[in-house]
Image (cartoon, rainbow, N blue to C red):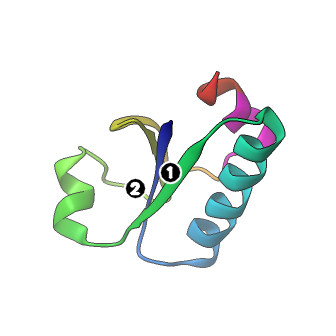
Amino acid sequence: MKKIQILGMGCAKCNRLQENAEAAAKSLGIEYEIEKVNDIDTITSFGVMVTPALAVDGEVKAAGKLLTPDEIKELLK
């Protein structure tokens, strides 16, 4: 099971990134869990200074940009 974390303070782009991540995981047919991380100390502990950010299984894959479902699918494979 993939653990997908959306790092951000709840802005529109963060919410959209979550929607895109869910769409990507569903289209791949993988088991996943999505967690929204909005605590600033936790976000910075990942080394992220710009949100939204996406982490997969605890590893930051992208920060500071809104990824498309297709871009996220490549990161989940």
Q: Residues within 10 Å of mark 2 (few under 14, many from 20)?
A: some
Of pointers 1 and 2, the one earlier in the residue sequence: 2
Question: What amino acid does circle 2 point to?
Answer: Val
Task: Look at the image and tell me whether residue 17 can be seen.
Answer: yes
- Labelled pair 1, 2 in contact (Cβ < 8 Å): yes
Which residue lies at the image location 57% right of the left edge and 45% below the top edge? 32
The x, y position of residue 21, in whole percent, is: 66, 50
* 71, 26: nearer the viewer: 26
Q: What is the secondary structure assignment of the residue under circle 1?
A: loop
Q: Which residue is mark 2?
A: 50
Membership of 52 in magenta stretch: no
Q: Which mark is residue 76?
A: none
Give the total of numbered labels. 2
Membership of 70 in magenta stretch: yes
The x, y position of residue 40, in whole percent, is: 24, 69
Q: Quadrant of residue 69?
A: top right
Left or right of residue 27: residue 56: left
Q: What is the secondary structure assignment of the residue under circle 2?
A: loop
The x, y position of residue 24, in whole percent, is: 75, 43
Secondary structure mostly taken by the magenta-highlighted segment of the chain: helix
The image shows residue 44, relative to residue 11, as above or below, that is above
The image shows residue 31, relative to residue 18, as above or below, that is above
Which residue lies at the image location 56% right of the left edge and 67% below the top edge? 14
Determine the CA span between mark 1 and mark 2. 5 Å
Question: What amino acid does circle 1 point to?
Answer: Gly
Which residues make up the magenta segment?
67-73
Q: Which residue is mark 1?
A: 64
**Is the C terminus in the top left, top right, bottom left or bottom right quadrant?**
top right
Left or right of residue 32: residue 43: left
Which residue lies at the image location 43% right of the left edge and 66% below the top edge? 8
Q: Residues within 10 Å of mark 1 (few under 14, many from 20)?
A: some
* 77, 53: nearer the viewer: 77
